[in-house]
Image (spheres, rainbow, N blue to C red):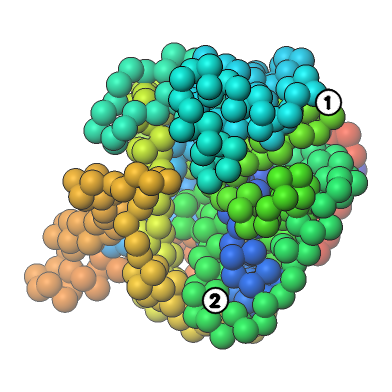
Amino acid sequence: AGLCSKLNGAVPGEPVKTDKISRRGNWGNQIEFILTSVGYAVGLGNVWRFPYLCYRNGGGAFMFPYFIMLVFCGIPLFFLELSFGQFASQGCLGVWRISPMFKGVGYGMMVVSTYIGIYYNVVICIAFYYFFSSMTNLLPWTYCNNPWNTPTCNGVVTPRGINNTLANVTRSLVTGAAEVAVEVVNKTKRTSPSEEYWKHYVLQISDDIGNFGEVRLPILGCLAVSWVVVFLCLIRGVKSSGKVVYFTATFPYVVLTILFIRGITLEGAVTGIKYYLTPQWHKILDAKVWGDAASQIFYSLGCAWGGLITMASYNKFHNNCYRDSIIISITNCATSVYAGFVIFSILGFMAHHLNVDVSEVADHGPGLAFVAYPEALTLLPISPLWSLLFFFMLILLGLGTQFCLLETLVTAIVDEIGTDWIVRNKTVVTGGVAIVGFLLGVPLTTQAGIYWLLLMDNYAASFSLVIISCIMCICIMYVYGHKKYFKDVEMMLGFPPPIFFRVCWRFVSPIIISFILIFTVIQYKPITYNDYVYPGWSLAIGFLMAMSSVICIPIYALYKIAKSEGTTFLERLKNSCKPDVKWGPALNEHRIGLYATPGSEGEVEVRPLKEELKEKEDEKRDEISLTIQGSNGSTAHNTTPSA
C-alpha cells in the first residue's frame, strides 16, 4: 500500500487520486477503449460499401481523395469528439453543459443512434440466419432444384456433373415453360440461386413497401438472439463490453486474413484485385469522387452518432485521446482497404468462372453480403466452412457497432436522470432499451421489411449527421470559443492540440462538412431497390426520419432561450449560450484553474469503504501490474483500499 501511495504521489494516510469515477465507471484499461472504438468505427460498411465505391470511382485513384479526406476531416473530427467526451466525462447529452442552448444536438445524436440501432440489429440477425443455414453439408443456395426456385433460376454450379445449362433447360421444360428455357440457355436473363434464396426463401419479399404480409418467424427469432447477445455483452456496461471486445474486435481480422489467403489462391483473383486497384486518374477531377470519399470517411468513422463521445466519456481524464484518435482512424481506413482485397479476390474468381466482367458481379450493401458473396462461396471447395467464417465475421463486425449504439442511448439516459437508483440499476435501463429496440425492429422482419430497412439506411443517417456535426464544430469553436477549448484540451492532455488540428477544427473541417452536405443534396436520387421504385409517401416518411433528428436542435434552442434568465431576447440568448456551472472535469481533483471552486482543489472523490472494497475485488484481476504515470497520462492503480 505504501509503494502504491508513493507511485500516486500521495502521502501515506491521505486519500489517493485514482483518476477514476467510481459512480459512473471507467474502462478497465486503455486497450479496451481502443478495441471498442475500433469495433464501433469498423462495421459492415467497411466490407460492403468501401470496395464498391473504390471500383466505381476510379479504383486506385479513389485512394488519393479518400486519404486526403481522412487527414483533413476524419481524424480531426474523431479527435474533437473524443476530447469533448473525455474532458466532461459525460455522454452525448451531458457534454452540452458547454453551451446548454445546443443540447438539442445531443438529442439529435440520440435519435440517429436509435434509428441505426433498430435496423442495424436486423442486418445482424439476417447474418445470424445465414450463419445457422451454413451449418450443413450443402449450402441451400447452391442449386436451382429447391421449392422456392423459379424457372429463370440458373446456377453457376453444375449438379452431379451434368451440364448446367442443359440441366436448367430440362428442368424448365418439365415445368412447361419452353420460352423461359430458351431465355435461360441464351443467358439473356439470369437469376442466381443465391438471389432467389435471398428473395423468395429468406425474405419472402412482398411486391410493395406498404404490403407487410406476415412476420418471418425465423428472422424474428434471430432478431431476438441478436438483442439477447447485445444485452448480455452490455449487462455491466463498459466493464462487461470492454472484455467482450477483445474477441469481437479482433477476430474479424483473423477471418478476413483467412478469406484473403484463400481468395488470392483462386484462379481469376488477380483480375479482381487489378479491377479494384487500377487507377483511373481522369476521375480525380470529378467532384463526385471527392464527394464520395468525404462521405465515406465521415460516415464510416461514426462521427455525429454520439458513440465516440460516449465511449471517450469512460476514459480517465488524462488519457491521451490524441494518440487514440489517430490509431483508431487509421485502423478503420486500413481495414476498408484490406477488406477490398478480400472481396475482389473472390469476385474476380467468380467473374472468371462465369466468363463475365468483374463489374457484372460486383455489388454493394445487402446485395454483396447476401447475394453476390454467398454465390461466390458455393464455388469454393468446402463451401459451408467459408460461408460460416464469412457470416461469423459479419456478425462480429455488426455487434461491435451495435454495442456502442446501445451504450450511447443507455449512457445518455442514465447521465441525464442521474439519480442513485438509476445509476445502480443501469442494467434495467439496458434491458429496457433492448426490449424497445427489439419491438421496434419487428416490422423489419415482415415481408416488406427489406424495403423499410433500406429506407432507414438511406434517410435516417444521411444529411442529418452532416448538419449535426457542422453545428457541433460551430458551437465548440465559435460559441464556446476556440481559445478556451484549446486550453481545456491542454489541461487534460498536458499539451495543446497541434496547430494542424486547431486549423482543421476552426476552418478546414467545417468547410469539408459543408461540402459533403452540398454534395449530398446535389447528388440526391430517390431510393430504389433493384427494379422497385419507392412510392412518394414512403420517401416523405424517409425525409421525416431524417428531419426528426435535426429538428431537435432548433426546438430545444427555443425552449432553452425561453427558460433562460433575462428581460430581452438578446439577454436570454446570451445566458443560454453560457457554459453551465457544472461544465468541466467530473472529478474535483481535476477542477483546477478556471474550474476550481473554493476549497475544491486537491479534493478527491469520496466513496464508502464498502463500495471501494467491492470495486477493488472486481478489478483485482486486471491490476496485477502497476502502471507508472507516463506521457499518456495513465496512472498507477492502487491495489489496496485507501487509509
Image quadrant assignment for residue 58? bottom right
**Horizontal arrangement in the rendering, residue 69 relative to residue 558 (left or right):** right
Looking at the image, residue 315 sits to the left or right of residue 254; the answer is left
Q: Secondary structure at mark 1?
A: loop
Helix, strand or loop at label 2? It is helix
Foreground mark, 1 or 2, reads 1
Name the residue nearer the viewer: 352 or 498.
352
**Residue 485 can be seen, yes or no:** no
Q: Tell me which residue sits at (63%, 49%) in the image.
A: 361
**At which x and y percent is residue 244?**
70, 31
Q: Is residue 138 above or below residue 126?
A: above
Residue 248: quarter of image: top right
| Above or below 194: residue 297 | below
Please rate how many residues cluster around mark 1, counting C-alpha atoms within 10 Å: few if below 14, some from 14 to 19, many from 20: few
**Residue 566, position in %: x, y?**
14, 68
Amino acid type, residue under disc 2 in the picture: Trp
Q: At 48% across and 48% down in the image, what residue appears?
A: 91
* Left/right of residue 72 with respect to residue 525 in the rendered view: right
Question: In front: 564, or 31?
Answer: 31
Which of the labelled discs sits on residue 290, or is there none? Answer: 2
Residue 620, which numbered label? none
Instruction: Report the residue at 66% width, 24% height from top.
Output: 167
Q: Are there few (<14), some (14-19), or many (20+) residues within 10 Å of tag 2? A: many
- Residue 183 x %, y %: 51, 39
Write down the residue under mark 1: 382
Answer with mark 1 or mark 2, whichever residue precedes in sequence.
2
